[in-house]
Image (cartoon, rainbow, N blue to C red):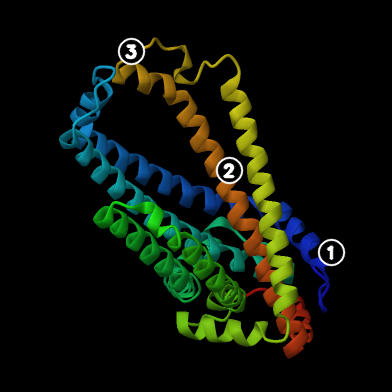
Amino acid sequence: MIPLGPLGLGEILNGTFATMGRYWKQLFGVAAVVYGAATAAVAIALAVAYATVGDRLREVIDTPRGVDPSWTDVRPLLIAFGCVWLFGMAVLVASNAFVQATCPSVVQSAVLGRPTTFGAVWRRALARFPAVLGAVLLSGLIAVLPAALFLLAFVVTLITSITLDGSPDQLFWLIPLGFLGALALTPPAIWLWVRLSLAPAVAVIESRGPLASLRRSADLVRGSWWRICGISLLAFAMAAFAGLVLQQLVNAVTAVGGLLTPSTLGGDPTVGQVLVAVSGYLVLFMVAQLMTQLITTTFPQLVLNLLYVDRRIRTENLAPTLAEAARTPPQG
């Protein structure tokens, strides 16, 4: 799929598209199973939440016009929403990590020009999933947590001050302070993210643990930070654009006639009418979200995996080893 030598931008992108074209069944098959299971898990969580607080939801929706719903009814809804959101975020992180463990296995086969199967890719990804998940969580904590904690502290301070003093005008200076603090922490977060971006590939291809993968990624990126940053940002931008196109197509479909939205309901719909009206839109939205997730996760990761191969070719003279491995018949 790629020339066994230092890779330029065009060769990396061509190799990524060629890998997706040849191994799409294995790559998208595993990703579809993972994200499908994640979607089903979140749907079950939503069903459990609705079964738990559905009565409160009906009370809020059926509140007479001009009357605010009571806090007794709203609080359980907020708690249920928060629990479902946290569960969904945890499932999303785990799903993304599994797909990130899948991509290096596919790239290995693509670089060597060997066929592979869904089962082989699944077993390899499953075996390396804990290491990849650990690397993803650690890199997120290292790169993102400082900025997230600063923003959280800023929001809590602002809300607490307004609540206690009741004079938000006197606290206007906190807003530029929070913005400047987040702005100051963004460059080191980006720098760290790029340094650690090759860790999932290391964890799978070299079978290293989370910490060793992070250290190895930092060593490989050294001396080529700007190049890896630019190419990876381009890959994420291309994937985001493709995902946006899919979302717009779904919006266009649901906008035709307004048949899948609550716009055709009367002024005082019941909970059942609302759920029936939006069910079609929710199905299309979840399908589009699944397709978007497949693209926005797999494409950038394939690019990063080829950047990993490129760095090893440039710094460790990996090309002869790859050529010899390509000529050797696979075992079994």
Residue at label 2?
291
**Which amino acid type is shown beneath numbered disc 1?**
Gly
Residue 238 in the image: state x and y as whole percent.
71, 53
Q: Which residue is depicted at the point 78% across and 80% down?
A: 323
Residue 218 in the image: state x and y as whole percent.
60, 84
> Does 305 sit above or below residue 242?
below
Residue at label 3?
268
Q: How far apart are the alpha carbons under marks 2 and 1?
A: 25 Å
Q: Nearer the viewer, residue 114 or 31?
A: 31
Q: Nearer the viewer, residue 11 or 108?
A: 11
How many numbered marks, from 0 up?
3
Circle nearer the N terminus (1, 3): 1
Circle nearer the N terminus (3, 2): 3
> Does 179 sit above or below residue 162?
below
Query: Quadrant location of the C terminus?
Result: bottom right
**Which amino acid type is shown beneath numbered disc 2?**
Met
Q: Are marks 3 and 2 in contact (CB under 8 Å)?
A: no
**Which amino acid type is shown beneath numbered disc 3?**
Asp
Residue 42 in the image: state x and y as whole percent.
36, 44
Residue 130 quadrant = bottom left
Q: Which residue is depicted at the point 47% across and 24% down?
A: 280
Query: Quadrant location of the N terminus?
Result: bottom right
Residue 146 in the image: state x and y as whole percent.
44, 73
- Image disc number at residue 10: 1
Q: Which residue is depicted at the point 59% across and 81% down?
A: 217
Q: Which residue is depicted at the point 60% across and 73% down?
A: 187
Task: Give the left or right position of residue 61, taking residue 73 as reference.
Answer: right
